[in-house]
Image (spheres, rainbow, N blue to C red):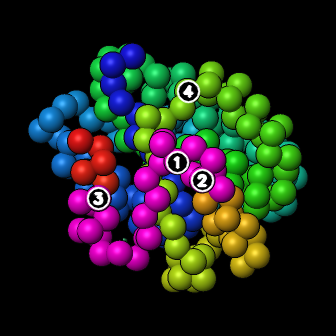
Amino acid sequence: MSGRFIVFEGGDGVGKSTQVRLLAQALADRGDVLVTAEPGGTELGERLRKLLLDPATGDISARTEALLYAADKAQHVAQVIRPALERGQWVICDRYVDSMLAYQGAGRTLDAAELKKLADWATGGLVPDLTVLLDLDPSVGVGAKRELDRLEAAGEEFHQRVRDGFLALAAAAPERYLVLPARASVEQIATAVLRRVT
Ligand SMILES: Nc1ncnc2c1ncn2[C@@H]1O[C@H](COP(=O)(O)OP(=O)(O)OP(=O)(O)O)[C@@H](O)[C@H]1O
Ligand SMILES: [Mg+2]
């Protein structure tokens, strides 16, 4: 594998998609870049995304939710991410395993070690070269949203646990993370990310 795998993580509305786009633009003339996102990124994944995020889906048990996210990742890694890395592409992904550990683990309070095993199994143990964690008080990020999807509507305490979950993951492996305050300016964040990546 010669490509590099870069992931953006963080809560809802923190600016992940904005920074994914900017990094992809900045890297475009240095190499072959593939931009993708979870849940989604494959045809099956798009269907799973709809099920997972549509409020009309109603109650999903926490374990079912985790399994659907794991299925999305398994398909995405097998069909998109791993082949791209093997072709030598840079892969920039909007959310990955940490989102599942933070939302279904810390948020839904599923056992962290069990969930980690499930995620590793689903992805075949594929770990990002770098994860950029955009950290923000959820009352700002989620709070700015008008229409909430099923996960965004899970409540303030849930989103506080998710935030803490992300920070704990970064603290446990600091060499693989860049943690940035998400309300620094868009340009400041993009510059810090590019400096670290290059
Ligand atoms: N650094 C920043 N400071 C202030 N506002 C920002 C910043 N970055 C992005 N935004 C704004 O915050 C909103 C959410 O940004 P964006 O869609 O990139 O976040 P996201 O993390 O991808 O959200 P979602 O969880 O909905 O996918 C947008 O209105 C965007 O313009
Ligand atoms: Mg987004």
Q: Amino acid at mark 3?
A: Ala
Going by the numbered disc 4, the residue's amino acid type is Leu
Membership of 184 in magenta stretch: yes
Total number of numbered discs in the rendering: 4
Q: Earlier in the sequence, mark 1 or mark 3?
A: 1
| Sequence-first disc among 4 and 1 | 4
Question: At numbered mark 2, what does the secondary structure look like: helix, strand or loop?
Answer: helix
In the rendered image, which residue does mark 1 sit on? 174
Residue at 29%, 43% in the rendered image:
197
Main secondary structure found in the magenta portion: helix
- Give the residues drawn in magenta, as a range: 168-192
Circle nearer the N terminus (2, 4): 4
Q: CA distance from mark 4 to mark 1?
A: 18 Å
Between label 4 and label 3, give the one nearer the viewer. Answer: 3
In the rendered image, the quadrant that contains the N terminus is top left
Q: Position of residue 114 (x, y in %)?
A: 83, 37
The residue that label 4 is drawn on is 126
Q: Earlier in the sequence, mark 4 or mark 3?
A: 4
Q: Residue at x 63, y 66 (%)?
A: 163
Indicate whether 109 appears above or below 122: below
**Mark 4 or 1, closer to the camera:** 1
- Identified by mark 2, the residue type is Ala
The image shows residue 169 at horizontal and vertical percentages of 63, 50
Foreground mark, 2 or 3, reads: 2
Q: Residue at x 23, y 60 (%)?
A: 191
CA separation in Å, label 1 and label 3: 16 Å
Camera-side residue: 25 or 184? 184
Report crowding for label 2: few under 14, some 14 to 19, many 20 or more residues within 10 A (C-alpha).
Answer: few
